[in-house]
Image (cartoon, rainbow, N blue to C red):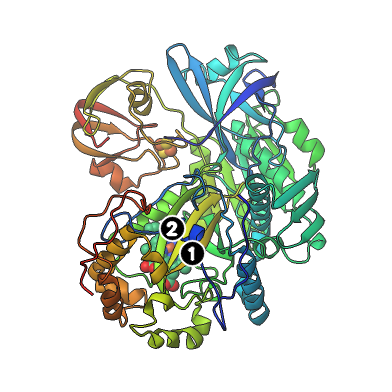
Amino acid sequence: MTIQFNDETFRDDYSFHNSAWAIKRFPFPFHEDSYMYSVNMEQHRGGPAGSIYEKRFDVDEHYLSEMRDRAMVLADDPLRCQSLPHMTLAGWDLLELIMVSKSEDYPELFELHRDGNTWRWVNKPMGIDDTFTFLDEATLPYGPLEYITRQAQGDWCVLDQRDDNLWMDAGMVTTQADWSLDFDIGMNFFEWHAPVPLAHEKGIFVRALKFLLNIQQGSPARRLNWTMTVTPLLDTSPENYHKWGIQKTTLTPENIGQKQHLRVELQTFFRLPRSNALVFPIRAYLCSFQDLMTMPKWGRRLHRVIRDLPEELATYKGFIANRPMMLDYLSKFDDGLPTSDGIWPEFESEPPLKPSADS
Amino acid sequence: MSGAQKIAVTVTEIVPLNELVTRFKFEPTDGSLLPTFSGGAHTVVEMKDGAITRLNPYSLMSDPMDQTAYTISVRRDDVGRGGSLFMHKRVKVGDQMTISYPVNLFSLDLRAKKHLFLAGGIGITPFMAQIKQLERTNGRWELHYATRSVALGSYVDELTTKHPNETHIYYDDQEQRIDLKNLLDGQPLGTHVYVCGPKGMIDWVRKTATDEGWPREAIHYEEFLAPKSGKPFEVKLAISNKVIQVGEDESLLEAMEREGVDAPYLCRGGACGQCETDVIDYSGTFIHRDHWLEDADHKSGKKIMPCVSRFEGKTLVLDR
Ligand code: HEM
Ligand code: FES
């Protein structure tokens, strides 16, 4: 299908919106009526046609506006993109992975023509047509990592693998859920995960790291993570907390359906061939509560998950104060009927909300 | 599914280098391009030897950026269980084989100011690819390569011709030895040392470097263990609900695969940790041969690495 790119913003007037298509394919992260941290990883080998799992790197209607937002964040704060000197080769690996994947998966949008080390890259939506020499930084306007991730949705952590650990030695991070590349740069897997509650005690990070160290070329993996964001702001960084933290206090029972967004990250893991580094793309998808409620299954389930979520998680994810208001809203969409397994909305088979639900 | 992704290849060249070592070249059967890789990576080669399928890891030694072909060098092991003999005696040019995607457990540390390579015998192969990688990126390196004799010195000519200043050769039969302590002392700050060769050499290098105060993360080593033959034994697999026999010339991992159990693996050489299996019950003695588990794990009787380790005794029950 051809994608209609939205003209929208993630700041100021917040004109971000999801089409009916985008709502239907939203990666709802709960496969059952409750949630706890787990080593929830699976192979990343495609998925149902049209779903966000189908392509190696999903491109959707928000592509152009997300890239505009990234350029603005970088103009204000260049440290959102960093690469330690030994990570340049990994940057080229990533550039190649994205260019090859996108030109194969979306031939109508992207083209890559390679003649030895002379490469021509055409990005039609962004109006880019550049010819450069592979592995020669002087032939690109930015380093390879920055060049390609200014043209690819989501954040990108590039991890060096050594000494049986992963090290956050490069990245492009402008759409993060309250963490900072500048703070985490050079840290290892356990160090940057230190703030996460409960998961360390459950041994989740030890097992997750073991899994990641063994991810092989040609066998990428994926998982979903989620949090909550008030107003569709992509750049919820600690550096800007003074700008977005305050918005959490503007929620009212009247505006919550439209202002409160579930923020879901599709996280994937790819081994990079030349550098043996690991790349960790974190692609954020936003959906307002009122749009989510158009799927009866999601309405029922989201209420139950938020209601029963351990306090530590609601605190860490930053919505403990607003949880009662969320539950008031969400309970209207939970009529107590059972839900089917899995994350897909099943809107054809799932029964509509019973009109008798209390309101 | 266990192991890395597979690639169908055709053998396009076989070059005997000397009495013991033969080089094999693989090209993709469908004419496509192979994945690039990083120096130090290996591939697992599948050998269909009658009813038995052997999977042996070999370091890739071709240029990591060359996507048209991979090459490996195989040293014949006359007392081994037959993997290398199969390659030497049975494989012909034109044969179709299956190999795995590259897997790297012996990667360069790209932060290093200089890479000091120590090779023993067939342990030269991963360095062949690492040297090609560093030459492309202007990396600084030096090689010290010990081999039994002039006749058995695989790739000595190529290395000394192309890199006369970086290459140093030591012949065992001429009583030439690497002066390791002095060599390590003379290295600039930020040097990383890499060793690949027989177990004795690896232990010697690791110990000497550690004693000289080298940080653990600056010492890299790779030793592929081939599974060793041993007495047959019986294993109960609790999850699969099977009792299986491990024969004299097969590994525990191979026996599980023969019985249709999808057991995880990657390196098949005791190095990656992927096959780690919990022991539920046992009465007997473990013959641990892996590099993965800590000594305490070996002594605990609670874990085994089925790719290389064996068991002697009455009962062994595994959580698989
Ligand atoms: C190498 C890849 C990974 C990177 C770069 C990464 C990075 C991060 C970062 C920066 C945070 C935020 C920590 C903070 O509060 O400052 C985080 C949170 C977290 N990570 Fe990872 N992570 C990776 C892989 C994983 C994996 C494989 C798991 C598997 C279980 C995992 C589980 C979590 C969890 C549970 C949280 C808390 C998230 C929340 O509740 O919103 N991470 N990660
Ligand atoms: S398969 Fe790698 S340690 Fe056993």
Q: Nearer the viewer, residue A33 or A220?
A: A33
* Image mark for residue B1: none
Residue B205: image location, x then y, percent: 53, 46
Quadrant holding the N terminus of chain B: top left
* Image mark for residue A285: 1
Considering only vertical position in the picture, is A64 above or below B217? below
Residue B36: image location, x then y, percent: 66, 41
Q: Are marks 1 and 2 in contact (CB under 8 Å)?
A: yes
* Image mark for residue A27: 2
Q: N-terminal of the two: label 1 or label 2?
A: 2
Q: Secondary structure at mark 2?
A: loop
Q: Nearer the viewer, residue B123 or A115?
A: A115
Q: Residue furthest front?
A: A355
**Mark count:** 2
- Chain for disc number 2: A
Labels 1 and 2 positioned on one and the same chain = yes
